[in-house]
Image (spheres, coloured by chain):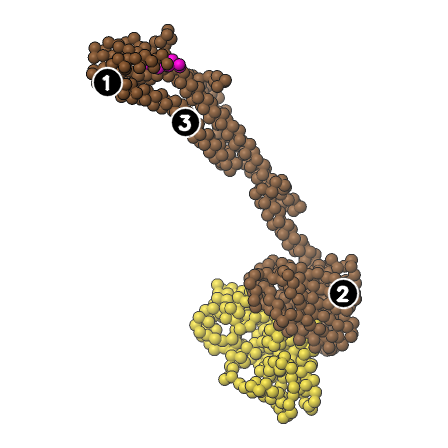
Amino acid sequence: MGVTLPNLAPGLARARRAMRAGRRGLRRGRDWLLAHVPHQVPHWARTLRLRLAGPGQKVTVFRSAGFRFASIYAGLLVISAAALAMFLWWATAGLLDRETEAAIRADAQGLSERYADGRLNALISTIDDRIAQNVDDDAIYLLVDGQMRPRAGNLSAWPAIVVEPNVWYPLPVQRAGTRSLARAMRFDLPGDFHLLIGRDVRVRAQLRDLLTNALLWAVLVVVAMASMGAFVARGLFQRTIANISDTATAIAAGNFAERVKISGRGDEFDQLAETINDMLDRIARLMDGVRQVSNAIAHDLRTPIARARSRLEDAALHARTEDELSAAIDRAMSDLDGIVAIFQALLRIAEIEAGSRRSAFAVIDLTPLLADLAELYEAVAEDAGMHLTVSAPPILPLHGDRELLQQALANLLDNALKFSPPGGTVRLAARATAGGAELQVADEGPGIPAADLGRVTERFFRGEQARSTPGSGLGLALVQAVAHLHHGALILSDAAPGLRATLSLPRGSDNLHA
Amino acid sequence: MRILVVEDDKDVAGFVVRGLKEAGHNVEHADNGRDGLFLAASEAFDAVILDRMLPGGIDGLRLLETLRAQENSVPVLFLSAMAEVDDRVRGLKAGGDDYLTKPFAFSELLARVEALARRGKADAPVTKLTVGDLELDLLSRQVRRAGQKIDLQPREFRLLEYLMRHAGQVVTRTMLLEGVWDYHFDPQTNVIDVHVSRLRQKIDKPFDTALLHTVRNAGYMLRAEGA
């Protein structure tokens, strides 16, 4: 190891002393402050707050979710770093100790075998050999007889502290002029001889201290890094939350165009942001619908109401006979019925758009539904000198709302019959598509100018040609609402001549075998 | 017929009660749910016209559920401003026999109540319906007038059957659309008129007297001459 790190233990003791002194100083300072300026003692715990969300919303540091997540992150990081350091210490420094002990035991085993084979002289020569061959110069041997007189070895006298056999002793030794530390053990041999075997562990102890130090420093660095990381994580967390919170605040303040910014990373926060934005889009669409309806009510219902009112007023002022009066009342009543019908259509569209009707969804077969409608309208077509043709597959199952699909098709047929010229043909057709079903009503009327195609599904919109015909301008709006409820679409196209209205509906559910 | 009107709106109630009396019915009126329940449970009526939202702690639904729990099967028509499809379904599930939303035409209400009251008195299942010299055999599915066989399409047959079952009563276009076609919406075009006029071509045109009459501002009525 090339880097020398300062030993921490004395530093820690100094730090403890300094902290004690600091605390004493703080206490004294506080007492002084309390005695002299009692009203200006800052209550730091209560005032330690930071702004998290919007104006007026303060969250104390310790209650902030960002702080909590960051602390958990830092805590986990420190715990795992400490666990790693402890394992490393055990695997290295501990290993050094264990190796030393194993070497001494092996030595003792070997020497006692030599003693058993060749008596004392062989043992003494072996000890001398081993000392001579000890390249690291860390081996310590001492053989003494019953009177504790040294017979062999490199230690001048039996150390007094080594008494018990088979116990590890830390042994301060003086060798070649330097003080050192050894780890030693006493072994008793038969014939009242005692053997002391040890290893100089000064180098190893240094190594171990170095390692311990390094690991402690590493843990400290990890703590510092974890705190910084936690700070950064809290910042990120706060920024993300603040992004969403800002948007919500802006919307609460009435700025509906605001959307949560998407970072483009495609992470969970982006997914959340997209979900929130989708939700806001839907709310905006619904609100637009409401606004459009209230505008339409203001403009389009005023006319028939005014008409009914003036009829009644005219009758009240000018009717001369009872017949005239009741005729005026009848006409006003039918005007009012018309208004009621418009209201009902509006409410029904709103009800469909709110999506609450999806509970009435069931598996239905479109073919008989088409046949029944065609039967109902065929008579009307024939009366008006038109033809109504139907084509549908033998069976066409779909998951949907029977009543609403009937009404949507009836509206399309109403329109087709209204605008077709005498002798024209209205085609009602259904076919299965890859994803579901397609229902089509085509007429041979004047069609809808391309410029109006996108607008005819708006509530109360009436094209130039439709203005002279009876109707409320709500029929196609309802058809489109029904299409959307079924997650489908209403597509209007030019049938050259005439209009082709196509209801494209997804099957809506798997395993449809009506 | 004896009819109970449970309705808290004074104008609507007055209008309905007056109209029903003019039509020759015996009418009782309650302006809250508690009195309505008491009257309906203690006296015999041919039909009940019931508002959904009522003062007095018992609303129309509760009233009807309590009544049905007592095995009282008097025909009940809901008359309510709650016009959503779900409201209608809830009303019918609670035991209502019919559901009319406000605002309504009195002719529609009268026609429906009379049809309901009549249904309540239904006799044993019939196999043959007769109005004047018009006969409809439900088993052989044949129609004859003055002994002469008339060919009808299946839907025309059902339309005539409905009209004959309600002979002498006003039947509105909406009732026909619901009863014969099972459609619960109002088409813009006069589809019902066209079908009725086709039926009229077959059962009335070749004969001297008309059975199928148009009632102005209301609907249709099938009735024998002088009946």
Q: Are marks 3 and 1 on the same chain?
A: yes
Determine which residue is flagged by label 3.
A91
Question: In the image, B108: left or right of B64?
Answer: right
Q: Quadrant of the C terminus of chain A?
A: bottom right
Q: Classify 10 Å Cα crowding around label 3: few (below 14), some (14-19), many (20 and above).
A: few
Q: Which chain is brown?
A: A
Distance between the alpha carbons at the discs numbered 2 and 1: 117 Å
What number is the disc on residue A495?
2
Residue A234 screen position, x and y as percent: 54, 34
Camera-nearest residue between B119 and B177: B177
What number is the disc on residue A189?
1
Q: Is residue A164 visible?
A: no
Q: Which residues are magenta?
A: A134-141
Q: Is residue A200 above or below residue A401?
A: above
Instruction: Tell me which amino acid carries mark 2.
Output: Ala
Camera-nearest residue between A314 and A306: A306
The disc, 3 or 1, on the residue closer to the chain's N-terminal end is: 3
Q: Are marks 2 and 1 on the same chain?
A: yes
Query: Chain B in the picture: what colour?
Result: yellow
Distance between the alpha carbons at the discs numbered 3 and 1: 34 Å
Furthest residue to the top? Answer: A177
Camera-nearest residue between A391 and A347: A391
The reply to whether the C-beta atoms of the residues labelled 3 and 1 are less than 8 Å apart is no
The disc, 2 or 1, on the residue closer to the chain's N-terminal end is: 1
Q: Classify 10 Å Cα crowding around label 1: few (below 14), some (14-19), many (20 and above).
A: some
The reply to whether the C-beta atoms of the residues labelled 2 and 3 are less than 8 Å apart is no
Of circles 2 and 3, the one toward us is: 3
Residue drawn at 46 percent across, 33 percent down: A76
Instruction: Tell me which amino acid carries mark 3.
Output: Ala
